[in-house]
Amino acid sequence: MSIKLRHQRVSDAEAFFRILNNPNFKYFSSVPKSVEDEVKWIKGCPAKRRKGLEYNFAIIYHGKLAGGCGIKIDQHRKHNVEMGYFIDEDHWGKGIATKVVKMLEDIAFKKLKAVRIEILVHPKNKASLRVAEKNGYKKEGVHKAKVIGRDGGYEPAVVLSKVRLPK
Ligand SMILES: CC(C)(COP(=O)(O)OP(=O)(O)OC[C@H]1O[C@@H](n2cnc3c(N)ncnc32)[C@H](O)[C@@H]1OP(=O)(O)O)[C@@H](O)C(=O)NCCC(=O)NCCS
């Protein structure tokens, strides 16, 4: 299976807008309101990378854009990072997210020197819980009102983590 991560490009905006506005993305809240919104977001990524805030990537599956993912650094405790990911519904169930989590994890632990990686998942998002668990992330508990959902409400999240202490 060929999966590559590359920086997001303005030319990806239309595809990201379509993928993210899928009503079946019930538990994913970062939904662009327009293609222009998405362009703006993508244009902001290099500055966020330079400042060490976020590292976002396009997921390329056999040469085609199939989703997006990223790593966000906790600015108060920089050893602590959060990973996120989404896959175009046309490609669900092919093991892509499972492999992407592993790839992001390598970047986080090796390049960014993270010690703790968190994945936040809505308790009903069975597919994402499975992806995290298949990669060895352990459930730590359910945090109330942790994230803002698609409809703007405060939603709970299962916090899963993997810790690698420096030797
Ligand atoms: C969650 C998501 C990223 C999974 O991507 P994917 O590439 O299809 O994931 P994978 O193929 O690597 O693995 C999915 C696993 O979940 C399982 N799964 C899928 N739907 C499920 C369900 N309703 N109940 C239980 N398990 C389910 C699959 O069987 C598979 O497990 P298996 O390999 O043991 O069979 C994708 O569904 C998505 O983008 N959803 C919308 C955005 C989102 O929720 N992102 C995550 C936010 S935390």
Image (cartoon, rainbow, N blue to C red):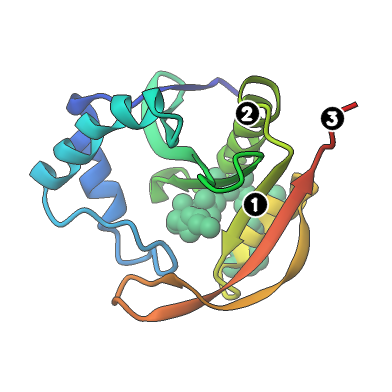
Q: Which mark is residue 166?
A: 3
Q: Residue 70 carries which label?
A: none
Real-space Cα distance between discs 3 and 2?
19 Å
Q: Nearer the viewer, mark 1 or mark 2?
A: 1
Question: Taking the image as drawn, is residue 120 in sight?
Answer: yes
Label 1 sits on a secondary structure element that is: strand
**Mark 1 sits on what residue?**
118
Label 2 sits on a secondary structure element that is: helix
**Mark 2 sits on what residue?**
103
Contact, CB < 8 Å: mark 3 with mark 2? Answer: no
Real-space Cα distance between discs 1 and 3?
17 Å
Residue in the foreground of this view, choosing between 27 and 106: 106
- Any atom of ligand 1 within 8 Å of the CB at mark 3? no
- Classify residue 27 by image quadrant: bottom left
Question: Taking the image as drawn, is residue 14 in sight?
Answer: no
Label 3 sits on a secondary structure element that is: loop
In percent of width and height, residue 37 lies at: 14, 46
Name the kind of residue labelled 2 in the image.
Met
Residue at 50% of width from left, 44% of height from top?
75
Name the kind of residue labelled 3 in the image.
Pro
In percent of width and height, residue 35 lies at: 12, 44
**Mark 3 residue crowding within 10 angstroms, few (<14) / some (14–19) / many (20+):** few
Q: In which quarter of the image is ligand 1?
A: bottom right
